[in-house]
Image: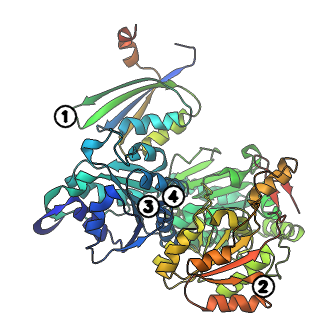
Amino acid sequence: MSKDATQKLTGSQIAVRLLERQGIRWIPGIPGGAILPFYDALSRSKSIRHVLARHEQGAGFMAQGAARATGETAACVATSGPGATNLLTAIADARLDSIPLVAITGQVATSMIGTDAFQEVDTYGLTVPITKHNFLVGSAGELLQVIPQAFRLAASGRPGPVLVDIPKDVQNERIEVGEWPEPGRRDPPPAADAGAIGAAVALIGAARRPILYLGGGVIHSGGSARAVELAEKAGLPTVMTLTALGAMPVDHPLSLGMLGMHAARATNLALEECDLLIGVGARFDDRATGQVSSFCPEAKIVHIDIDDSELDKIKTARVAIRGDAREVLERLLPGIETNAREDWLSRISELKADFPPRMPGSDDPRTPHGLIRAVAGRLGDAAIVATDVGQHQMWVAQAYPLRRPRQWLTSGGLGTMGFGLPAAIGAALARPERTVVCFSGDGSLLMNIQELATAAEENVNVKLVLMNNASLGLVVQQQTLFYGGRVFASRFGRGPDFLRIAEGFGWRTLDLDAASDPGAALDEAFSARGPVFIQVRIDRDAQVLPMVAPGGANKDMIGD
Amino acid sequence: MNSIVKSVLELEVNNHAGVMSHVVGLFSRRAYNVEGILCMPVGDGRSSRVWLMVAGEARLEQMIRQIGKLEDVLSVRRHGGHEVFERVEEFFR
């Protein structure tokens, strides 16, 4: 507790002061009746800027974009009732991808709770299954414990979202505050078991065909460099989950890129042959493993995760280590013997040569892979790359040369269409020195298109690349491949004129289809600061390949 | 009582509104039935003890780890058998 002269403050003033003390510098949200006392206090903050979203889900994803790009806990704010329900998708998305987020919601006055008051909804009850923890605050005094605790919980252990629901009377309650609590910070992670670390070192040393399997926890823990070091020292070919892309540069000689449903065939075949799988901060998600009984059938498993409920959840580990990914990697490294592992790495090279990544049209910026390569070639490693969800997302995951942690913002676990634009705005606000490119599809973009207004108002440096196929492309693809070609409810009969819409929102636009020199047009679009909307028409029948059928074994891939 | 082996879980939890919904929600969202629940405050009333009777399924170990992650759960123990539910049976006749 730090001493301060005693002051009489409202719950709202206390909440705002506590956010300031947490180091929050901007907060996205939308005001409404039950959160107005908080907004009134926020209006007088000298250090927190409010960013007015156009939908609460947009505010939630802006906070997520900031948290994903920086690793710092971000906050967002909404009113009661529909404000809170609109936030739910962004909160659930943060839960599944372990993103540290503190959501603050207004609630009807304590005396009205349970009466079906105007804009009353059971926000606490609704958020039980999608938060790490949640609070319904009972008094202004409680805020002094609850808000620091919310930030501590969001950042500690496996990160995640925490919700703080504050009734209007609590926001208005005036109390004496003499001492301020320390800001909530990440707890030191539990120390990993030394015996298990020794056992893991021995298994890695004895393995003949090991593979390192990196998940989002490697990014969250700041352990990417240590993971690359381990791979290099022990000669470990390395696969990454969708959320771990960037942990090892994808063009690193040991990288096998993403595993699973849309991996390169060589990657899944290598996993088929491995005798030891070292999972770090990964949870054996079904999009990564395919049919679990056929996943790495020959392999013993070393599983490192900070959440012990992930250990042995899907696959039983030979050695399970509960701990922070970075810390465990640091403790493993000294015991690991340098191993060139020539036989296994030459087998990997053989697989890569037999099944090269499939990148049709990668020299033509009017094809999916070619467009992504053309954008990447112009933006380099400094840019942040956000996506929405669908075919474009998988093409970007396959083709964008991601080379650093926190470069890549994508909705993995929940797979939320509408994630991309607001997440890109949040990342651009948190990292104003960087360009943020957002790849989207016409289906996804429409789900949060209102945030074009926020982006224009904030003049964020977001380059939105719309890959327009007038379809829900991944649905069309699944219907084509697995439902007898009965394409239904997945083609848009009459798509909107996105370029005019973007112009109407105040964006500069580029119609890449009409450009005589697409490369030069992209150069020009990227040279200007501020939001630019780039549309490219994509072949409506293009597919993301190769592909594992949902529920199928990873070795059985469709497409070459 | 059917023939499935029942396990008894003993939880120490913070005593405030919402804790029970956190605990039973873990079960209900996995379609895992909680057969019996007893809960009373202990000591000065700041914490409560919760007794749960559940089927001793293979996934119970996973459930116990999930319960252990709840912020309001102070401890969780698994009993093979326990007389607590037998002793309150007279209230359920």
Q: Position of residue A290 (x, y in %)?
A: 74, 50
For the residue pair B74 and A338, the one nearer the viewer reads as: B74
Calculate the distance from the C-alpha at mark 3 to the C-alpha at mark 1.
34 Å
Q: Nearer the viewer, mark 1 or mark 2?
A: 2
**Distance from Cα at disc 3 to Cα at disc 2:** 41 Å
Query: Of callouts 3 and 4, which one flags the residue occurring earlier in the amino acid sequence?
Result: 4
Spatial CA span between label 2 and label 4 = 36 Å
| Disc 3 target residue | A101
The chain holding disc 1 is: B
Determine the image quadrant of residue A188.
Answer: bottom left
As helix, strand or loop, the secondary structure at mark 4 comes to helix
Q: Which mark is residue A90?
A: 4
Mark pair 1, 2: CA separation: 75 Å
Q: Which chain letter matches label 4?
A: A
Drawn side of residue A437 relative to residue A11, left or right: right
Is A132 drawn above or below residue A6 in the view shown? above
Camera-nearest label, 4 or 1: 4
Judging from the image, mark 2 belongs to the subunit labelled: A
In the drawing, what numbered circle is on residue B44? 1
Of labels 2 and 4, earlier in sequence is 4
**Mark 2 secondary-structure assignment:** helix
Q: Crowdedness of circle 1 by 10 Å Cα count: few (<14), some, many (20+)?
A: few
CA separation in Å, label 3 and label 4: 10 Å
Numbered disc in front, either 2 or 4: 2
* Label 3 with label 4: CB-CB less than 8 Å: yes
Q: Amino acid at mark 2?
A: Ala
Horizontal and vertical percent for residue A547? Answer: 80, 58
